[in-house]
Amino acid sequence: MTSNHIETQAIRTQIERTEFLEHSNPLYLTSSFVFEDAEDMRASFAEEKRRNIYSRFTNPNTSEFVSKICKMEGAEDGYAFATGMSAVFSTFAALLNSDDHIVSSRSIFGSTNSLFTKFLPKWNIETSYFKVNEVDHIESLIQPNTKVLYAESPTNPAVDILDLDFLGQIAKKHNLIFIVDNCFATPYLQQPIQFGADLVIHSATKLIDGQGRVLGGVTVGRADLIREIYLFSRNTGPALSPFNAWILSKSLETLVVRVERHCENAVKVAEFLETHPQVQLVKYPFLPSHPQYEIAKKQMKLGGNVVSFEIKGGVDAGRNFLNSIKLCSLSANLGDTRTIVTHPASTTHSKLSVEDRLETSITDGLIRVSVGLENVEDIIADLHQALTNER
Ligand SMILES: *Cc1c(COP(=O)(O)O)cnc(C)c1O
């Protein structure tokens, strides 16, 4: 029985049971699989049958995880990776040729930005960027050799929103492969394929694991593109481990309930911050004050778990705020059960010039809060005391 409901898909998509008729899917810690005879081996390698050969190619645990994400995202096929970044890199490495060109949002994950600016140029692949508030001139960036349109929404760390439907139409008109990193939204809150995305990438390390345990990544979407990505990956080896796939597949079963509570807490945190005198500006997609509130409402089910705000007093105030935090964690991750606060201007983005930071809306006093699943009163009390001590 198949279901269109995402909770049911996440729970009831499973690979075949073994002879033991286990209820919960076991862990397949095996590097390879055996063949019945020479003919079985020949036919398997010739891909005349779809079966497991070697866990660098496929494994029952990774297949289950990928099938769940495909159902939840409405995708034809997918491949799972050891990390979100190996998903991003392998996707580009598989699909692009030297001298191809990328048009990308300026507000993208730091390592993806490094891939575009430091490493892909080795193969003469250049990237042109548009700012989130300058989407009108995207078409002027497209060249005859442009192959990919790339975006993330909501963005990290400023929590801006890009209109995926609008981007999807541009990609279609110019015959570009539209790739969306959907990590901040999860397949529950937003399904980019509905808005014209050809491929969707996730860092499963974040809300999909949701408990800060394992790294993982996945790319899903058009079967013809996934075939290229699969062939590249089965030869180059970025595969997700069976153990991590098992963890991530289990995590998906609780994704909806977790993300709902994350979002419920995040709204309350955002509303609290808006009333605090030390806070200059709060950005949360589902607050009416958000500049792209209407677009967020159109493409997302809820606003996500990340709230950003501008503390009065710039870099020093940001550092002092972090030093005053007691309950929440100072950590580089996000989407964990534990609330995490970061100050991008003095940490993750400190190497950028002030001008470059401002291009991606990272002001000196910007604080990013990945709102967790603790009781929201405790989260708010900690932020409140840190904002008050900070003076
Ligand atoms: C964390 C993250 C990545 C990279 O994922 P890893 O699992 O850390 O390699 C990519 N994109 C976004 C938006 C992320 O937040």
Image: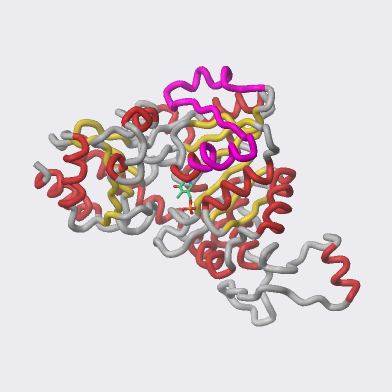
User: Which region is colored magenta?
Assistant: 114-143
Q: How many marks?
A: 0
Q: Nearer the viewer, residue 29 or 248?
A: 29
Q: Nearer the viewer, residue 337 or 309?
A: 309
- Asked if residue 297 can be seen in this view, the reply is no
In the picture as drawn, the residue positioned furthest to the right comes out as: 39
Q: Looking at the figure, which quarter contains the N terminus?
A: bottom right
Residue for point 66% across, 32% down: 100
Q: Give percent across and percent down for residue 243.
A: 55, 70
Q: Give percent across and percent down for residue 297.
A: 42, 33
Residue for point 13% across, 34% down: 277
Residue for point 10% across, 44% down: 388
Q: Give percent across and percent down for residue 254.
A: 46, 60
Residue 133 part of the magenta-drawn span = yes
- Give the quarter of the image for residue 96: top right
Residue for point 72% across, 47% down: 228
Q: Is residue 20 left or right of residue 335?
A: right
| Scheme of colours in the image | secondary structure
Q: Give percent across and percent down for residue 294.
A: 41, 27
Q: Nearer the viewer, residue 149 or 378?
A: 149
Q: Is residue 194 left or right of residue 315?
A: right
Q: Nearer the viewer, residue 53 or 271?
A: 53
The vertical placement of 53 against 168, above or below, is below
The vertical placement of 56 against 20, above or below, is above
- Give the quarter of the image for residue 306: top left
